[in-house]
Image: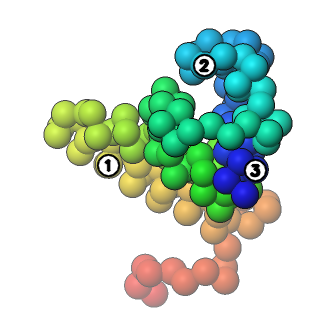
Amino acid sequence: MLQKNLSAAMKVIRASRNQSITEFSEDLGIARSSLQDILNGTGNPRMDTVEYIASQLQVSPITLLSGSFEDEQLQTALLLIQTIDAVSKLTDSQRLEFAELFQKMILLLNSESEKTPDNTPDKTTKDSSPE
């Protein structure tokens, strides 16, 4: 089961990077044949190898082994993990600015989702303005 989960996660990551097996193995610092075995679900890497691969990808080993995501969900989870990691490296003022911009984006997306197909406000949503 873990081999299948690792294989699926690695396939999604490689596809998201649009890399050949050779390019991906070079980035990871593992032999091409070992990577191919992992991708085929026939490899049985030791835990320290999984931890090494995870560190090269800047993700948790659990992310690679969990198998709790479909391909698209795994891509989203990996992007979220990478974003959280990047934000954690920002200064306090940069994190505050990121949070403010993120909130604006969420509000914008929410307001767009409340419009009807003809781009007018949906009359069925609650309006908080006084009448």
Residue 103: % across, % down: 39, 54
Q: Residues within 10 Å of mark 3 (few under 14, many from 20)?
A: some
In-image side of 40 versus 90 (left or right): right
Q: Which residue is pictured at 55% across the width and 83% down the height? A: 126
> For the residue marked with disc 2, what is the amino acid?
Ile
Query: Would residue 54 be seen by someone viewing this image from the given angle?
Result: no
Q: Which mark is residue 129?
A: none
Determine which of the numbered discs, if any, sits on residue 100 in the image. 1
Is the residue marked by circle 2 packed among few (<14), some (14-19), or many (20+) residues within 10 Å? some
Q: Which circle's residue, 3 or 1, is located before the other in the chain?
A: 3
Closest to the observer, 123 or 72: 72
The picture places residue 73, in percent across and down from the top left corner, at: 67, 54
Q: Which residue is mark 2?
A: 30
The percent position of residue 36, horizontal first and vertical second, equals 78, 26
What residue did someone put label 3 on? 4
In the image, 104 versus 69, the foreground residue is: 69
Question: Between disc 2 and disc 3, whose residue precedes?
Answer: 3
Residue at image position (32%, 48%) is: 99
Q: Are marks 3 and 1 in contact (CB under 8 Å)?
A: no
* Quarter of the image where the C terminus is located: bottom left
